[in-house]
Structures are given as structure tokens and as C-alpha cells.
Image (cartoon, rainbow, N blue to C red):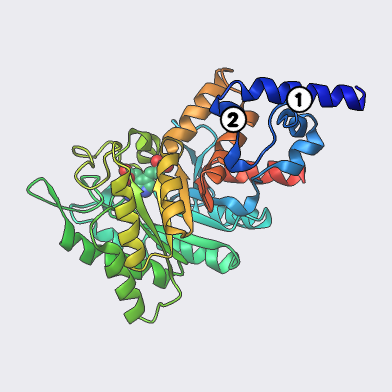
Amino acid sequence: MTAGGRQAFQDCAIESYSKTPSPALTCPAMNEARFPWTRLRRNRRTDWSRRLIAEQRLSANDFIWPMFIIEGENRRMVVDAMPGVERLTIDLAVGAAEQAARLGIPAVALFPYTDQSLRDATGGEALNPKNLVCRAVAAIKKAVPEIGVMCDVALDPYTSHGHDGLMRNGEIVNDETIDVLVKQALVQADAGCDIVAPSDMMDGRIGAVRQALESNGLTHIQIMAYSAKYASGFYGPFRQAVGSGGMLKGDKRSYQMDPANGDEALREAELDVAEGADMIMVKPGLPYLDVLWRIRDKLKVPTFAYQVSGEYAMIMAACANGWLDADTVILESLVAFKRAGASGILTYFALDMAKRLRTQL
Ligand code: PBG
């Protein structure tokens, strides 16, 4: 096009657009030229250009890897509803944690499968300093001191009724549960756990745990609060993996959040930060990206998403059927968390993704 021709084209385009006062054609707030001077597809045309303009980049640094632990030696046990996920004995878990550290994964989260004979109404095994998870923490920290180790603070792997707290007359009692959770957190911290993560959704537990850590000289222990933990159907495969599903009496709606509520999640997160949480978590993940975004945007604290067992199962089931492409959707689901403001993601895909991302560098 000649210079004169281009001018005429521009005049004509401006003329026709100015006759069409559609807000879609102007971006005054962004101070952006209009079509055709702005063509967003230009930046998207080539692979090198897409890589240059990418707003998010996933790396192994973004992951916390949840692992299931069983008693015994040199033994692995599949989780039916989570193809690709295995429960490991402590010796194998140590090897897996070494591998995770080598791949650059910053932390693992440990979940014990407690023998049914050790479960009772009050979850007493949670306070045994030699319980399965404490031994796993100690073994991993000894062999792989450079990896962060996180533990759930909640009673559900230890109670005969499968609830996260103490039960009286069919109710989960708040304040007495806190007393036990505080002791559980101290036992885990003594075992060498770096991050205690109360996942029980009792009111006031973060402040109580922080207070106890401070007064016991455990001032460096981090707290990741499961602040916005919803009463979700997506935890089913996890409960199978830790053996608490079959025994669960009723549901957890009197303490976990109603999926309908977003404002309430902000109140939960604000309280937890005020009570001394270092990090906040939203759970489940993809169905609650709006909650993640709101918390991160408002509170500006490190905020994590937990892509839970049911989300993992959905993706794996569809991929196993050939209905979805695993490589595409796993990456897409994880980058979505980053776009929504996640500092990091608890995901059962962590190890595989870390391997894949390394070969892509
Ligand atoms: C227990 C706990 C649960 C999960 C993490 N910690 C289950 C529950 O609250 O019933 C779920 C994780 C997952 O589904 O992957 N307090």
C-alpha cells in the first residue's frame, strides 16, 4: 500500500468506526490503537513470540507434592480411583522425596494411611510422636534436609468416625478439638515438620497453634492454613487413599465451607492471616479459582491452591478413555492456577510435571 493509500485507509477506518460508537471498538482505558493497527493475533502467530509474551511460566518451583504413606517396607499400594498415584512405605517415600528434591520441587505434603486398629473416637494416635506420619517426616528430613515437609493438622486419619474433630452427640465440637490439634501440631513440629497445615476448619485454630508454637520456641515453623476448604465431593479418592472414606459418618458440612460462598472465604482467610498464618490455601482447586483470585488480590499473602484427588481422578479418567489429551489438559489446568494468582499448587501431578518441565527447558 502506498503512503497515500494507507492514509486514506486509516481515515476511512477511523471515519467508519467513529460512526459506530460501540464500546467494543475503543479501549480508552488501555490507550490502545484500534483494529487494524492493533491485531492481537500478531503476537500469537509464532511459537517464539508466544513464548516471549507468556504472562505465566510453570516450573517445578510451583509444586507441593502430596504423598500417601503406609506401614511396612519396600511396598507400594495403588489407589484405585487415582491411577498413577501409589501409597508408599517410608523407605520408598524417602527415595521419592529425594527424586522430588532433585527435580526442584520445594516441598512434599505427607498423608498417612493409619491402620484401622489404631483409630478411635478421639483420634489419639495423632498425638503419638512415633506415629506413621511422624516417622515419615523424620526419615525424609534426615535423608533430604533440603526439601520442605508439610503435614495436615486434622484428626480424620485417626478417628473411627472419619471426622476432622472430636464428636459429641453427633456434633463436631470446636474448642475441645482445638486443644487436640494444638498438641498434634507440636508433635509434628517436633518430628521435624516444616509447615503445619491445619485442614480441620475449626474456628480459632490458627491462633491457638501459632500461640503454642511461639511459646514452645518453635518460632520458625510455618503455618499454611487451609482457610477456604469447601465441603466438596472432590475429596472422595483421597478418603479412599487414607482409608477414612468408608468410616465417615455423615458429611463435613458443619465445618467445611458451603460451595456457594465466596465472601465467607475472604473472612476465613483474613482471620487466619490475623491469627498468624504464613500462607493460605484454597481447596479444591479449579472449581474455586475465583476464590483464589479474590484472596490473593485482597490480602496479598502467599496463596496456594490444592488440585485435589477428585480433580486428578477426573482428568486421569477422561485421558484413559482417550477423551482428553493428558499432556495438554494437565499443563493447562496447572497454568490456570498461576493465572488466578496462586503462589504454588498442591498437585498429584507434581513429579511427572517436574520431569516434563525439565526436559522442556
Ligand atoms: C483431611 C483432608 C482432606 C484432604 C486433605 N486433607 C479430605 C477431607 O477433608 O475430607 C483432601 C485432599 C484431596 O482430596 O486430594 N482433613
User: Is residue 114 visible to the viewer in this orientation of the structure?
Assistant: no
Within-10-Å neighbours for mark 2: few <14, some 14–19, many 20+: some
For image coordinates 41% across by 39% down, the residue present is 288
Q: Which residue is mark 1?
A: 11
For image coordinates 83% across by 27% down, the residue present is 7
Label 1 vs label 2, nearer the camera = 1
Within-10-Å neighbours for mark 1: few <14, some 14–19, many 20+: few
Horizontal side, residue 358 vs residue 167: left or right: right
Horizontal side, residue 112 vs residue 347: left or right: left
Eyeballing the image, is 32 above or below 315?
below
Which comes before the other along the chain, label 1 or label 2?
Answer: 1
Where's the N terminus, which quadrant?
top right
- In the image, 83 versus 173, the foreground residue is 173
On the image, which quarter does residue 210 sit in? bottom left
Q: Which residue is mark 2?
A: 329
State the residue lying farthest toward the left.
169
For image coordinates 74% across by 36% down, the residue present is 50
- In the image, 69 versus 293, the foreground residue is 293
**Residue 170, horizontal then vertical, whole percent:** 10, 45
Asked which secondary structure carries label 2, the reply is: helix
**Residue 85, horizontal then vertical, whole percent:** 52, 39
Asked which secondary structure carries label 1, the reply is: helix
Eyeballing the image, is 198 above or below 293?
below
